[in-house]
């Protein structure tokens, strides 16, 4: 950690600092302009495991941390453009950007190598559409027969024997979900709720605290932010979700009695789900409990 600094220790060019950060120079040029530096140079006061420390208008800042925040902002903006019906020019204007900048970020996201694309521990889930529950039920049944549903039922187990004392659930579908023909609307996330899906299985012995720690350590995010975080086990028949409901952190666990969850591919940094796949993923979760971010002091 760097304390009081009486003088600048080093002066590096932007390309040199970009190389140390493992990033391109585009963002560093923006930082340099805000700092009003001369000759495309950054006044660096220390380089270590924690990052590259440099002078900014607000004092000594960690460029690595600032860059992480910048990259997260870029990812959020790109995510907005991938929502069906989104207009890139309107999104760019809202964020004070040009459409060309946003299109460039989208191209960069598409060019990420597979090894890099698999690195992020969480990706946002984008739902193509939300439809009434009855329609979702029919869509999920039709998709299951074509092998395209969010979960796949084993037909040889669909005629499960009814044991005494076990309540009958009605016909339902091949995935073991309760019947959805009552006409009740699907309770889904509002436009302000983000659903973040873990890209790799986690140790399902972890409870609420262990999963929230994964969010903090691997995503560098706040589990109390109002987002819903989805985790999957190595066995594809179970998931866990954590979210903040305004009074405390909630844990939602689901295990399919029949079938497994099938996870869509990650494309352009998001996991795109149909309404049927999304319903199969979160059916049973009362989205009215998902609350806005907790205020911190």
Image (cartoon, grey):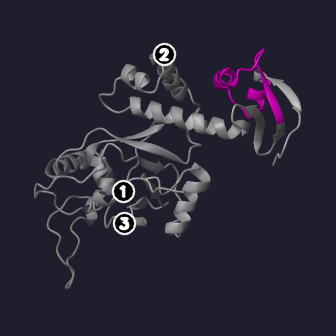
Q: Nearer the viewer, residue 23 or 226?
A: 226
The kind of secondary structure element at disc 2 is helix
The kind of secondary structure element at disc 3 is strand
The kind of secondary structure element at disc 1 is loop
Residue placed at 51% from the left, 56% from the top? 296
Q: Tag 3: Cα neighbours inside 10 Å, few (<14), some, or many (≥20)?
A: some
In the picture of the structure, the residue carrying the numbered disc 1 is 291
In the picture of the structure, the residue carrying the numbered disc 2 is 100
In the picture of the structure, the residue carrying the numbered disc 3 is 255
Q: Nearer the viewer, residue 115 or 57?
A: 57
Residue 153 visible in the current orientation: no
Res 56 quadrant in image: top right
Is residue 109 on the magenta stretch?
A: no
**Where are the magenta residues, as a range?**
16-45
Is residue 36 on the magenta stretch?
A: yes
Residue 211 visible in the current orientation: yes
Q: CA distance from mark 1 to mark 3?
A: 24 Å
Q: Nearer the viewer, residue 286 or 170?
A: 286
Q: CA distance from mark 2 to mark 3?
A: 45 Å
Q: Is residue 140 above or below residue 161?
A: above
């Amino acid at each position: 950690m760097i304390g009081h600094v009486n003088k600048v220790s080093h002066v590096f060019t932007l390309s040199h600092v970009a190389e140390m950060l493992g990033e391109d120079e585009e963002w560093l040029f923006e930082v340099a302009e805000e700092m009003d530096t001369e000759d495309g140079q950054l006044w660096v006061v220390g380089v270590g495991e924690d990052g590259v420390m440099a002078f900014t208008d607000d004092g000594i800042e960690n460029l690595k941390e600032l860059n992480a925040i910048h990259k997260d902002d870029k990812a959020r903006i790109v995510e907005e453009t991938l929502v069906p019906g989104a207009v890139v020019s309107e999104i760019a204007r809202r964020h004070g950007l040009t459409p060309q900048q946003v299109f460039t970020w989208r191209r960069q996201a598409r060019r990420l190598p597979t090894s890099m694309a698999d690195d992020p521990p969480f990706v946002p889930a984008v739902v193509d559409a939300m439809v009434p529950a009855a329609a979702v039920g029919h869509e999920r049944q039709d998709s299951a027969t074509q092998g395209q549903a969010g979960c796949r039922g084993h037909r040889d187990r669909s005629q499960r024997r009814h044991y005494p004392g076990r309540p009958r659930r009605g016909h339902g579908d091949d995935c073991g979900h309760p019947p959805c023909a009552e006409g009740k609307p699907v309770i889904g996330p509002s436009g302000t709720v983000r659903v973040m899906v873990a890209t790799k299985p986690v140790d399902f012995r972890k409870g609420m605290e262990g999963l929230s720690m994964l969010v903090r350590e691997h995503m560098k995010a706040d589990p109390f932010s109002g987002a819903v975080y989805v985790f999957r086990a190595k066995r594809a028949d179970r998931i866990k979700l954590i979210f903040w409901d305004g009074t405390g952190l909630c844990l939602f666990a689901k295990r399919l009695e029949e079938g497994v969850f099938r996870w869509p591919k990650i494309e352009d940094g998001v996991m795109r789900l149909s309404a049927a796949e999304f319903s199969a993923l979160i059916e049973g979760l009362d989205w009215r409990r998902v609350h806005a971010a907790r205020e911190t002091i």
